[in-house]
Amino acid sequence: MAKMPIIDFHKLMMVFLLGGDKMLKGRHLLDPSDFSIEELSEIFDLADSIINDPVSFSEKCKGKILATLFYEPSTRTRFSFEAAMLRLGGQVIGFSEPNSSSVAKGESIADTIRTIACYADIAVMRNPKEGAPRIASMYSSIPVINAGDGGHQHPTQTLTDLLTIRSVKNSLENLTVGCCGDLKFGRTIHSLIKALGRYKNNSFILISPKELKVPEYILNEVLIKNNIQFKQVEKLEDVISQLDILYMTRVQRERFFNEEDYIRLKDSYILDNEKMKNARQDMIVLHPLPRVNEISYEIDNDPRAFYFKQAKYGMFVRMALIMKLLGVD
Amino acid sequence: MLTITSIKKGIVIDHIKAGTGIKIFHNLNLDKADYKVALIMNVPSKKMGKKDIIKIENEIDIDYAVLGLIDPNITVNIIEDEKITEKRNLQLPERVINIIKCKNPRCITSVEKYINHEFYLSNKSKGEYRCIYCDEVYSVQEN
């Protein structure tokens, strides 16, 4: 006589209780707001564990393959993802520019991702066209991570920024955040404002020339709509003493409408020791890198300079993200 | 005086902004209709000065989403026994597929031709839609 199956109620209860932990498995990351604050916390908690004991994670993705589909060059982001997967014991396939792939023969994104999904467990895509990773996600049977789509989104940069702030400040709330430089075209800044705006009691000081102010839709649909405090100023030196975080971006000369304004303001967007004198001792300086001249090299030795550590946090957060999307414990 | 007889049973799309009747005519595929359809342009109107009207003598299932998107101020009258039995108010649809096209040259829809052009309603009071791929804004008022 066949035995009746034994129901393991303890196991069932554990699955029920821990169900939330698997919510990210199989998901895509296209936009920083795709994940709830709780889901982001899950990723950051895992990243913290990896930072504390990286060796114990070195075989977590053994046997798994990450595909890097880079339709435009980006050594920094690609290396960060590749290093993340290799440090988890996984392997990497992919292309770093479309001319070396079937894309050059005119293959559609839908076909490329469906083919890649036969070989890899998770895919990362950078594409100069905005929305390309979304199309990939619509046709993909494996998780797709947006590694930058034109001037649109770069969600893992936002995750990097949030993890860095959380790790250094021990919180993502009650912060005065200064965003300095090109706030009009800088997608990093737009995503950061949206992301930090979801946490309690953060305020923003937006420092830019008038030509490069934050777009109206960010002001209206993010800051004003959610009653988030902000002010717009032209000079960094006027407000640096008020900041918990200073997020620097580059101001390009060609973005200015006239030479006079450029000459008048250019030094306001270059961070140097003189300006740092007025900053708080616990303020941190962040930058998405690569830097050109907006942060003077003399700042690099200042303990408040966190932009290179930020790059390292970027790798850790990508490790945590890969593990979560693959559902690896 | 141009005379168009009243219809017994069907739909009258009224208060169409003068000049946009032809757009609605094509969007509803009325050029392929095998029933009686009249597009009347530049009809004098107290409220609008000039307006267009479309009369359809048939029970057809109209795509109200298209009408709402072109002009939410349009009125749709349902006619039975030559009388208006129902007036329908139009609303902006939450999703719009393959009716408007994304104008952002950097949008992936400019390259990958096989995909739908899809927009979601992002600001109802301003009549603004956003492309689901690149977030480019499409304003109903400006188009």
Image (cartoon, grey):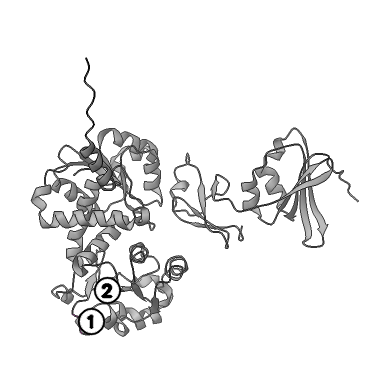
Badge 1 vs badge 2, beta-carbon distance below 8 Å: yes
Residue hosting label 1: A279
Q: Where A150 sits versus A211, above or below?
A: above
**How far across and how far down the image is residue A172, in percent?**
27, 66
From where the camera sits, is residue A76 visible? Answer: no
Say which element carries label 2: strand
Residue A190 among magenta residues = no
Describe residue B105's horizontal placement relative to residue A170 as left or right.
right
Amino acid identity at mark 2: Leu
Question: Which residue appears at 29% of the width and 53% of the height?
Answer: A39
Categorize mark 2 by other alpha carbons within 10 Å: few (<14), some (14-19), many (20+): many
Circle 1 SS class? loop
Is B3 on the left or on the right of A87, as rendered?
right
Could you say which disc has been placed on residue A246 in the image?
2
Q: Look at the image and give the residue range highlighted in magenta.
A: A277-281
Q: Please determine whether, in this image, residue A39 is positioned above or below residue A204.
A: above
The numbered dot on residue A317 is: none
